[in-house]
Image (cartoon, rainbow, N blue to C red):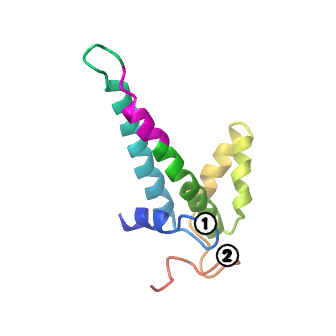
Amino acid sequence: MDAYLDGWANYFKFSGRARRREYWSFVLINGLVSAGLAVGNTLATQSDGVPIHFFGVLAMFFSLAVGIPSLSAFVRRMHDTGRSGWWLFISLLPLIGSIIQLVFLLQDGEPGENKYGVNPKTEMG
């Protein structure tokens, strides 16, 4: 849970590095919350069959809230592998771009310090 909270603590931090644990826990928990809100939106109806859009509105606000921290977590994850955050745009290439990006996100971070900062696995405090 600490790794997920690190994603929120670094809301606007686009410098430095993020471990795989921080990035993937942030993605997983946000995905589960989004899925739960989508299911709630699908199932929610009034007694007369009119849909209640409460969960849809919640999902919209949640998506807006996690947009910037998700982007910053991605950039810091790329930094951990020694790459620029600009690698985000490789996903614009159909299929192959997303595969390349996924491979980068799954790789272990560079050992030691790189040009983006100290390795978060070895950093104390």
Tell me the CA gap for discs 2 and 1.
9 Å
Look at the image and tell me in which quarter the C terminus lies: bottom left
Q: Which residue appears at 45% of the width and 68% of the height?
A: 6
Quick check: marks 2 and 1 in contact, CB under 8 Å? yes
Disc 1 marks which amino acid?
A: Arg
Q: Is residue 49 left or right of residue 67?
A: left
- From which residue to which does the magenta span run? 51-60
Specify the quadrant of the image occupied by residue 116.
bottom right
Q: Percent from the top left, x then y, of residue 53?
A: 40, 29
Secondary structure beneath dot 2 equals loop
In the image shown, does 58 or 69 lie closer to the viewer?
58
List the residue tagged with mark 2: 116
Q: Percent from the top left, x then y, of residue 112?
A: 60, 81
- Label 1 neighbour load within 10 Å: few <14, some 14-19, many 20+: many
Q: Which residue appears at 60% of the width and 50% of the height?
A: 102
Q: Percent from the top left, x then y, of residue 73?
A: 56, 61
11 in relation to 89, above or below:
below
Specify the quadrant of the image occupied by residue 119.
bottom right
In this figure, what is the number of numbered marks?
2
In the image shown, does 12 or 79 lie closer to the viewer?
12
Secondary structure beneath dot 1 equals helix
List the residue tagged with mark 1: 76
